[in-house]
Image: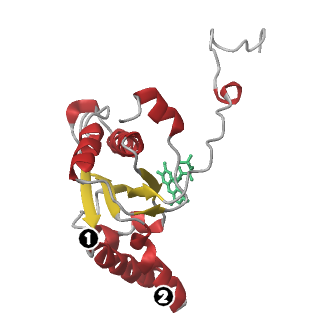
């Protein structure tokens, strides 16, 4: 039974580790449908979802490792190996990218935000369905070699590498949200005092 929306939204957390089973085809389809309901200024549908599972994760690892070696040629082989192994941290990866386009009233940043909202919908939907995921970027997300390896354009923005699977252990309890520190009830411009 999926969690209700508020329960899912308020309890989602990044699991420390993920394992099999990956979200199955029906769960993934539901997660991507949720992604497609993200707010989207201009209805541009800027998001692209690249689904990577099974042995394709090794190929992604090689793309990440080659790109890291090119970015930082002096790194020890152990660091390159670590990068190569990252996609094996979860049974399923969804790379979310935004295909940015010129638009008279929707700047690129709004297209990226829309893809980010889609990404969050995937994570919350995964959690509601009993799976888990965590969101990663890092320098690889901004690397044109990585984008090319994924079949993206250098003008696309990789918004996140979503690692998805079944939480191996219960996620650490979410920190209670300190409303007071983040919310202002605005009633008008601040009093700037009288006179110059
Ligand atoms: C755009 C974006 C990129 C992120 N990239 C990373 C990352 O590369 N490495 C990392 O440790 N956490 C990254 N995070 C944060 C984690 O995904 C996670 O949200 C954070 O550790 C807090 O844990 P929680 O999701 O359980 O609250 C990123 C979050 C966002 C929104």
Q: In the rendered structure, which disc, 1 or 2, sits on the residue that comes first in sequence?
A: 2
**In the image, the residue with mark 1 has its CB under 8 Å from the nearest atom of ligand 1:** no
Numbered disc total:
2
Residue 24 point in image, percent of width and height: 26, 54
Q: Secondary structure at mark 2?
A: loop
- The residue to which callout 2 is attached is 73
- The residue to which callout 1 is attached is 148
Residue 177 point in image, percent of width and height: 64, 33
Q: Nearer the viewer, residue 40 or 62?
A: 62
Q: Nearer the viewer, residue 37 or 189?
A: 37
Q: Is residue 129 visible?
A: yes
* 102 shown above or below 69: above
Residue 92 point in image, percent of width and height: 33, 62
Residue 172 point in image, percent of width and height: 61, 50
Disc 1 residue crowd, few under 14, some 14–19, many 20+, Cα 10 Å = few
Query: Horizontal placement of 133 versus 170: left or right?
Result: left
Query: Horizontal placement of 171 versus 19: left or right?
Result: right
* 13 shown above or below 85: above
Quarter of the figure with the N terminus = top left
Instruction: Specify the farthest residue to the front.
Output: 1
Q: Nearer the viewer, residue 120 or 129?
A: 129
- Residue 129 falls in image quadrant: top left
Q: Is residue 74 visible?
A: no
Q: CA distance from mark 1 to mark 2?
A: 19 Å
Instruction: Answer whether labels 1 and 2 touch (C-beta < 8 Å).
Output: no
Number of the label disc, if any, that sits on residue 188 = none
Name the residue located 29 percent from the left edge and 38 percent from the top edge: 34
- Residue 5 falls in image quadrant: top left
- Residue 185 falls in image quadrant: top right
* 25 shown above or below 76: above
């Amino acid at each position: 039974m999926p969690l209700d929306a508020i329960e899912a939204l308020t309890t989602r957390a990044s699991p420390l580790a993920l394992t099999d089973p990956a979200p199955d085809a029906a769960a993934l389809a539901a997660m991507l449908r949720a992604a497609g309901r993200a707010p989207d200024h201009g209805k541009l549908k800027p998001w692209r979802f690249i689904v990577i599972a099974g042995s394709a994760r090794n190929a992604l690892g090689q793309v990440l490792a080659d790109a890291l070696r090119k970015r930082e040629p002096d790194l020890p082989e152990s660091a390159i190996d670590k990068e190569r192994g990252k996609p094996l941290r979860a049974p399923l990866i969804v790379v979310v990218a935004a295909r940015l386009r010129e638009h008279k009233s929707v700047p690129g940043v709004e297209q990226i935000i829309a893809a980010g909202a889609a990404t969050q919908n995937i994570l919350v939907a995964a959690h509601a369905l009993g799976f888990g995921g965590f969101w990663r970027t890092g320098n690889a997300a901004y690397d044109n070699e990585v984008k090319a390896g994924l079949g993206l354009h250098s003008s696309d923005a990789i918004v996140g590498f979503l690692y998805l699977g079944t939480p191996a252990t219960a996620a650490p309890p979410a920190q209670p949200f300190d409303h007071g520190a983040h919310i202002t009830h605005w009633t008008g411009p601040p009093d700037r005092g009288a006179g110059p």
